[in-house]
């Protein structure tokens, strides 16, 4: 009895986590128009998905946006983290705290304020406005991830490198970056995922010229759930799994 | 002031706000010597070492290495390498890449780098460990890798910042001897800082005892031990008994002192402040004290003490006794010559006045 209780509990928790995903994957291969009854195995929804040009375009747009937003925020975030870690200056604590405020503030507030700002400066809503918005909410996550890594960093390592004849630039390239690499990678992935599935901020700051996947799906769902969406969800799932394994592999390799 | 010394400094000063960490230090280290800077923590020795390495700049004074002024030379261009307290091996690189790091910065070709790395690993007793990660090695092995990483560059000067501090006692004893051998083998000038007087004594050719940003005394280990120049050195280097009293008379470099217990004893005058009628402190080492029963010599000074306890520690066994309120330690010889000591029994301790040192009091 006492052995079964924890097992049952754990099984329930994992069922709760994975049943929805499993349903999505299974129904993406369902050869039935209505979507809620099993009609045999089929790849027809994948076919339909790839024939839906607007959908494919939205997917590419989303990937490109996530890629660029994650990269830009990793670059800016890493430099910010280094500055906050290495230098002492007035207002450092305030700047540090302000990162958390952006992270904790409701997305809707950020969305409204960004829209207001873009309209005020007359920025055309599209790729650029989306990129700026996504970098804004990804940035704190990168900074915090990199700072956490730096807090365990031996301050003598840069000095040892300098002592052995390295210039500041060489030291950064050969000692500092390899040490914070796992954090850069983790920050980048975090940014990528955040950007890829953002709906709230994107709804406000996107324009008709640049349609992205989450918004496209959202508008599709409103007129009724098509099984195509299941296929798309499955593809995204596979894609994130591949990304996860890739990052783990890089981390393992850098550790050796 | 260009000299033929490997390292020479004059009037170095480094202040942090109101605190003067390094206060007017001058030193001169001849080529090929093992020079130690010994002092308690907070005496400024790490600051001094960082000035020499180039991580920090002096407010005043000059640093010369082989006659060349180094003040404005950045650390990556000084012919100086440093072994850090916690070694600072690069965790993302193999042992081979750690050692080859400096060579690579000097644009030594890869094949040559591999050869030199293999050679130096051999010399420090770790042949064939190139491909290991430093984190997989033991403390003693890491120590050697850190040394090899510097020595492979053949620096004029090797700075060592308490590198043995992280090792356990047994390994530390072993590394002391090994460091000394490596220094002789490579012929590199070592500047070693430590708060452990035994490390400094065993390894060094010259020891500078540092206190509050200044050098109290710079001398070979034996001279520090036999002829400490200040009460601080007398108390810091080796063990010492300190007895207070009043100077009665001075003759032939020997001072006669009336101890607080009333006994008249003698010791060598070690400072100018010793004047008849004034307070003075007599320092005599536990190993210089003999039990009066075993030696009869009229020149010896004698005092009474009552036994408090005996501290058995093999060759370092000592007796703790009391002489009018102050504790006195004496070495207990383990050759059977020590008398049986009962608690609170009275013993006579005597010493050769030439081995005791007298300093004027109130000059800490």
Image: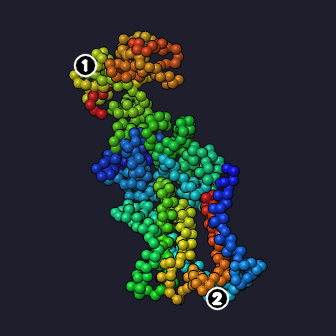
Asked whether residue B289 appears in the rendered view, the answer is no
Q: Residue A235: percent from the left, percent from the top?
A: 66, 76
Whether residue A195 sits left or right of residue B41 in the image: it is right
Which residue has dot 2 on it? A53
Q: The C terminus of chain B lies in which quarter of the figure? A: top left
Rendered image: mark on residue A169: none
Asked whether residue B37 appears in the rendered view, the answer is yes
Whether residue B352 sits left or right of residue B189 in the image: it is left
Relative to A125, residue A22 above or below: above
Which residue has dot 1 on it? B248
Relative to A207, residue B18 above or below: above
Q: Name the residue nearer the viewer: B295 or B157.
A: B295
Mark 2 Cα-neighbour bin, 10 Å: few <14, some 14–19, many ≥20: few
Chain under disc 2: A
Could you tell me which residue is drawn at 54 percent across and 48 percent down? B147
Q: Secondary structure at mark 2?
A: helix
Disc nearest the viewer among 1 and 2: 2
Q: Residue B175: percent from the left, percent from the top?
A: 55, 39
Could you tell me which residue is drawn at 43 percent across and 34 percent down? B220
């Amino acid at each position: 009895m006492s052995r079964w209780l924890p097992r049952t509990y754990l099984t329930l928790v994992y069922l709760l986590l994975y049943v929805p995903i499993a349903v999505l994957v299974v129904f993406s291969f369902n050869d039935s128009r209505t979507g809620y009854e099993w009609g045999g195995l089929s790849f027809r929804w994948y076919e339909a998905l790839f024939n839906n040009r607007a959908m494919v375009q939205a997917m590419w747009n989303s990937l490109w946006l996530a890629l660029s937003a994650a990269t830009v925020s990793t670059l800016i975030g890493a430099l910010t983290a280094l500055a906050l870690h290495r230098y002492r200056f007035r207002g450092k604590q305030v700047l540090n705290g302000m990162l958390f405020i952006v992270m904790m503030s409701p997305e809707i507030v950020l969305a409204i304020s960004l829209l207001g700002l873009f309209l005020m400066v007359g920025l055309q809503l599209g790729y650029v406005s989306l990129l700026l918005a996504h970098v804004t909410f990804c940035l704190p996550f990168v900074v915090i991830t990199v700072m956490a890594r730096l807090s365990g960093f031996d301050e003598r390592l840069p000095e040892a490198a300098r002592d052995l004849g390295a210039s500041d630039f060489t030291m950064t390239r050969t000692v500092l970056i390899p040490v914070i690499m796992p954090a850069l990678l983790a920050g980048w992935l975090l940014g990528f995922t955040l950007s890829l599935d953002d709906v709230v901020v994107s709804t406000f700051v996107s324009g008709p010229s640049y349609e992205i996947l989450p918004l496209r799906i959202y508008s599709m769902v409103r007129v009724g759930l098509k099984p195509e969406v299941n296929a798309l969800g499955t593809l995204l799932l596979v894609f994130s799994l591949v990304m996860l394994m890739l990052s783990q592999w890089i981390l393992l390799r850098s550790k050796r | 002031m260009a000299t033929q010394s490997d390292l020479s400094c004059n009037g170095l000063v480094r202040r942090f706000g109101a605190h003067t960490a390094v206060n007017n230090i001058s030193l001169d280290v001849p080529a090929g010597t093992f020079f130690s800077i010994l002092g308690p923590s907070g005496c400024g020795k790490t600051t001094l070492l960082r000035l020499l390495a180039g991580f920090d700049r002096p407010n005043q004074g000059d640093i010369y290495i082989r006659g060349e002024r180094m003040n404005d030379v950045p650390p990556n261009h000084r012919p100086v390498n440093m072994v850090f307290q916690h070694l600072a091996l690069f965790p993302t690189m193999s042992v081979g890449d750690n050692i080859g790091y400096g060579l690579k910065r000097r644009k030594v070709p890869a094949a040559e780098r591999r050869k030199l790395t293999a050679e130096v690993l051999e010399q420090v007793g770790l042949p064939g460990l190139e491909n290991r990660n430093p984190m997989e090695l033991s403390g003693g092995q890491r120590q050697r890798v850190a040394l090899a990483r510097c020595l492979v560059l053949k620096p004029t000067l090797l700075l060592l910042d308490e590198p043995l501090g992280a090792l356990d006692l047994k390994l530390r004893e072993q590394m002391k001897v090994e460091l000394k051998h490596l220094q002789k083998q490579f012929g590199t000038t070592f500047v070693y800082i430590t708060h452990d007087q035994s490390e400094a004594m065993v390894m060094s050719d010259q020891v500078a005892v540092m206190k509050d940003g200044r050098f109290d005394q710079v001398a070979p280990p034996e001279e520090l031990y036999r002829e400490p120049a200040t009460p601080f050195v007398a108390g810091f280097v080796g063990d010492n008994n300190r007895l207070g009293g009043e100077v009665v008379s001075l003759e032939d470099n020997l001072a006669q002192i009336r101890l607080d217990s009333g006994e008249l004893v003698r010791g060598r005058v070690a400072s100018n402040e010793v004047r008849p009628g004034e307070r003075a402190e007599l320092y005599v080492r536990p190993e210089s004290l003999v039990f009066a029963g075993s030696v009869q010599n009229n020149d010896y000074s004698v005092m009474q003490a009552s036994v408090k306890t005996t501290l058995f520690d093999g060759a370092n066994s000592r007796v703790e006794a009391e002489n009018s309120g102050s504790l006195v330690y004496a070495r207990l010889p383990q050759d059977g010559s020590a008398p049986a000591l009962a608690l609170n029994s009275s013993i006579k301790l005597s010493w050769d006045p030439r081995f005791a040192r007298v300093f004027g009091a109130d000059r800490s």
